[in-house]
Structure formats: C-alpha cells, structure tokens
Amino acid sequence: MRRVNKRSCILFACCFAAAGAQGALWPSGRVPVLAVDAALEPNATTVLEELERRTLLSFVRDDGAKAGLTLRTKTTPRSEGTTELCCFDPSSRTLRRELAEALLRALGAVPEEDASGLEPPSVVKRAEAEELNRLYAPQVLPPLSALPARVEVGIWQIGSPQVWPELVGGRGRRIIAGTMRWARGLAGNKGTPLHGVIGALPTFVFRDSKAEVVLLGPESAELVASRHLPAEPASEGLGAGIRRVTLHARRAGRRGVVAGVPTYLGDGSALFLRAAFAELDHFATSGQDLGGILQERRSALAWSEASRRAESHGALLGLPTFAQEGTNEKGELEVVLLRGPGVPRLDSTGLKEPEAGTGGGSLFAWVMVGSLLVSACYFVARHTKQGRHSLTTAEREFANLVDSL
C-alpha cells in the first residue's frame, strides 16, 4: 500500500451507510485511506496489502483527501465523504478477516459468509478477489480501442501467492506466462472492456504490490500458433526464446513485425509485435555483452532495465530482442520501444547512455533488487507473524534474489 503513504451492528451500519448498500465503486480503483487507529494498523496494513496484491485496486494513504476510508476501534465524528469502518476489537483472533469483510463491503463486493477454505495467512478468498476485479475492470482498464496501454495489476493476479516468490527469483518465463493467462481471461470475458484483447506482456517493473503490464490489441500484436514457429529447444532461456522467435519473424519476411516473444502458455505460441506501435533502437549494455546476458540467464533483468529507460522517454516498455550477434561496435543492445496510440515517434536521445550512478555490469541486477527485497521481506514478516518455524518460501525467494546478482 502506498503512502501520500468482534463484528458488531455498528460495523455493518457504517459499511452500508457510508459506502452504500448498492455497491458504490471508487473511481479508477484508487481508494484513499484517511486514517487507521494505531491499534489496528499492523493488521489493517496486512489486509490492504493483500487486497492490492490480488486485485486492480490501489490504496493510498492520504489524510488530505476529501473522501476515503477510516478504520476505527470506536466510532468518531466524521466529515462528509468519509467511509468509516467501525468498531473493531484489536484483540479479536479473527481481526484480519473482520477487516477484510468490512473492506470488501466498502469496496462494493459481498464477502462470502463461509470463511473456511482460506489458505493461511490469506484473509481474502479467491472468489472475493475475482468479484472485485470484475467490478473494477471497467474503472481501471482501458477499452480495446485505446491499446496498447500500460496498467498496474496486483502481483498475485499474474502469479499465485504460493508460487510468486519463485516467479520473481529470476524466472522471467513464468511471469510472461502468468501475464498472458491473465490477459486470456480478459479476452474471454464479454463483461470486460477488453473482450478480444490479443495478449499482454510484463515490463518487469514492480512497484510495491503492483506489477506493470502492457495490454496489446489486434493493431499492436498478433498471436502466432506453434505450427508457424521453429521448435523450442530444450532448456531454452527467456532471452534465447525471444531471439529465436524474433529472428524467425524477420527471416520469414513477416511484414510489419519487429519482434516476437514466446507466450510460455505450454502450446508453443508466440506474440508478434507489430511495427504500427513499435520502433527499434539501441541502448548501452552497462558492460555486459549479449553472450553474457544469455549465458547467465539475466534476460529478465535486461528487460527490466530497458523498460525503465524506455518509460523515461515516453515508451510503454522496452523489449530487448537479443537478435544481434554479440553487441554492435558501440556495445549496444537492440531494443523494441512500444508506444501508445497517438504518440509520435519517440525521442530516444540519451537512451543509449548507461544510467548515471551505476557502476559496471551489476546494473542489470540492481534494477530489480528493490522490488525483490520488498517481496522477500513481506513473506518473512508474514510467516513470522503467523508463528511458523519454517520460512522456506521466503528463504527460497531471498536465495533466488542473491543468486541472480
């Protein structure tokens, strides 16, 4: 959650009176949190973070907002526009679930009465998170006509809580697969504004509980079946897969295609990126040549760095193609810059220069260190609070982080 930072009848009355029993939604899925009583703070933060990880919603600590949520142990005078959730007993053994149910109602959803089936330490059921995403998709996601577009999704929308630590531990292919599965769910749902979307790609940029993804429509991408692609070699890494698909598209004379990315959905398919919204450029590899990136399986880290640089120049993402032989004479890596509708050719002046303050070949790793450490610390804290003796998930995630440096 970001900063700008015992159930009772009172609780239910506040939820329904302030938020509206008819399911009033928060504009753009952005929910200001005005105040949380100190006695509730640790548990409330945990619940809000889980909701962010599972949904399109974002909670923003903003005590200056005109409207927003407050979570209280006892009722207090409140100003117009305040949704007060009250009155929680900090000593309750089921406090987190009580907070979750109250928040679900305040967000316009209906919590399930039977809380059995929750997998500790989770306090929000999968069906409840799916209902929130269904409600807020029209609020948060752009229409098909506005693609390509970059959006933020909960990290657990593209990878379950059980496997997310392994996904961020350098396993870029699984993150792509999770992102594509999420987009496929949108494409098959006539109730979303993105029915018919072709696919989505991650930027490999993570912010707090959110992952950036770029949605691709029929004008910006094409889904290609495996029968039209060269077979995937055994143990092929992410960078090698992008290189294989991209070179095939170019050698096959696919007009209007600048690059390709395997979907890793298990069917051998790939996404081809169309030239209508993409252009080729280069950036310096910060001391690492192409062979080193591919051999050391640092392709996702290179992708993350390319996206961050590209975004600073107005692009939606930067995708290394890994399609050249080694590096060029200037030590630069070929990158596809994807832009949004109506955006003219990008000014990539300065894109080729290594980012200031980065020394040598460690840049690729440090680009993602912050995001990975946040996630690692989160899992350590969650397991510690639950009183578990084994921290295997968090330890595995941290080991993966260290191994990727």
Image (tube, helix red, strand yellow):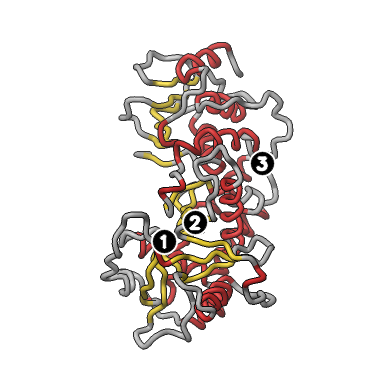
Quarter assignment of residue 399: bottom right
The structure residue drawn at horizontal position 36% and vertical position 25%, both measured from the top left corner, is 67
Mark 3, other Cα within 10 Å: few <14 / some 14–19 / many ≥20: few
Q: Is residue 49 above or below residue 170?
A: above
Label 3: which secondary element: loop
Q: Is residue 376 above or below residue 388?
A: below
- Residue 96: x and y in percent read 59, 30
Q: Earlier in the sequence, mark 3 or mark 1?
A: 1
User: Given the image, on which type of amino acid does mark 1 rest?
Assistant: Leu
Q: Is residue 93 left or right of residue 102?
A: right
Q: Is residue 117 left or right of residue 364?
A: right
**Residue on which the image places disc 3:** 387
- Depth-wise, is mark 2 or mark 3 nearer the camera? 2
Label 2: which secondary element: loop
Label 1: which secondary element: strand
Q: Is residue 325 above or below residue 83?
A: below
Q: Nearer the viewer, residue 252 or 261?
A: 252
The structure residue drawn at horizontal position 48% and vertical position 18%, both measured from the top left corner, is 20
Q: CA distance from mark 1 to mark 2?
A: 18 Å
Q: Is residue 154 left or right of residue 33?
A: right
Q: Earlier in the sequence, mark 2 or mark 3?
A: 2
- Residue 153: x and y in percent read 50, 47
Q: Nearer the viewer, residue 392 or 263?
A: 263
Marks 2 and 3 close (CB-CB < 8 Å): no
Q: CA distance from mark 2 to mark 3?
A: 49 Å
Is residue 374 in view from this perspective?
yes
**Residue on which the image places disc 2:** 218
User: Given the image, on which type of amino acid does mark 2 rest?
Assistant: Pro
Q: Earlier in the sequence, mark 1 or mark 2?
A: 2
**Residue on which the image places disc 1:** 317
